[in-house]
Image: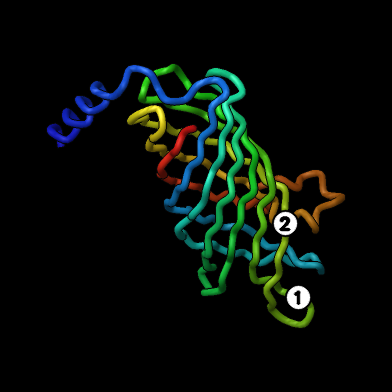
Amino acid sequence: MNKVLVTMGILLLTLPAMAGWRDGSSEFELFAGPHIGDTFTLETDWGEGYRMEVKDSVLLGMRGSYFFADNAAIEFTLAGTRSQTTEGDDFDFYYYHGNILYQFGHAAFAPFVTLGIGVTTTRHPDPGMGGWRRVTESDFSWNFGGGFKIYFNKNFALRTDLRTYWTNINSRHCEDNEDCWNNENVLATTEISAGFVFSF
């Protein structure tokens, strides 16, 4: 284990002193990784709640970034996964998010933080009046996270992300409810991803 850490440290030291990104540059990333599920209460049209658990799955996606400043970028994410509930019903997620990303320093090893908002589209089981069915809904969501990039040259990098998405899955049931964003209504899912970045 110590040998591995020493080797990684040497590799980082031998990377170029300056990262490939700069003011006015763009990046495109393809990524994949675990999508960590959550337990929440699914509200019904008649006021009853069903406790549901969404299983972990694999998230696939892409990101595009534009650095409008030397260390800050606007970023768009499109990602999706097919998960299941513990009862075996399919539960699909599609994330459409816009973020602000702040990247620290100018070295080849570049940590960052990111914050954004968007829409999460879910296709999930729902207890309708005529029995269980699958419904598709789009709800407001936001995300926060961070990670790091390792630039191997000015055009290519490795990126890792850890971020959580908060989605108000019961938004249609709480128009007059002042506590729509309590733990019962919010589905909090976590992305742990890695991907290849192409800079241009």
Query: Taking 95 as reference, is 2 above or below it?
Result: above
| Three-letter amino acid code of the residue under disc 1 | Gly
Mark 1 surroundings: few (<14), some (14-19) or many (≥20) residues within 10 A: few
Query: Taking 23 as reference, is 129 above or below it?
Result: below
**Which type of secondary structure does the marked residue at label 2 adopt?**
strand
Residue for point 17% across, 31% down: 7
- Is residue 78 shown left or right of residue 141? left
Pinpoint residue 57: horizontal percent, then vertical percent: 46, 60
Q: Residue furthest bottom?
A: 130
Pinpoint residue 21: horizontal percent, then vertical percent: 47, 25
- Residue under label 1: 128
Query: Taking 105 as reference, is 113 above or below it?
Result: below
The quadrant where residue 115 appears: top right
The answer to whether the residues at label 1 and label 2 have Cβ atoms under 8 Å apart is no
- Residue 138 has which mark? 2
- Quadrant in which the N terminus appears: top left
| Three-letter amino acid code of the residue under disc 2 | Ser
Residue for point 54% across, 43% down: 63
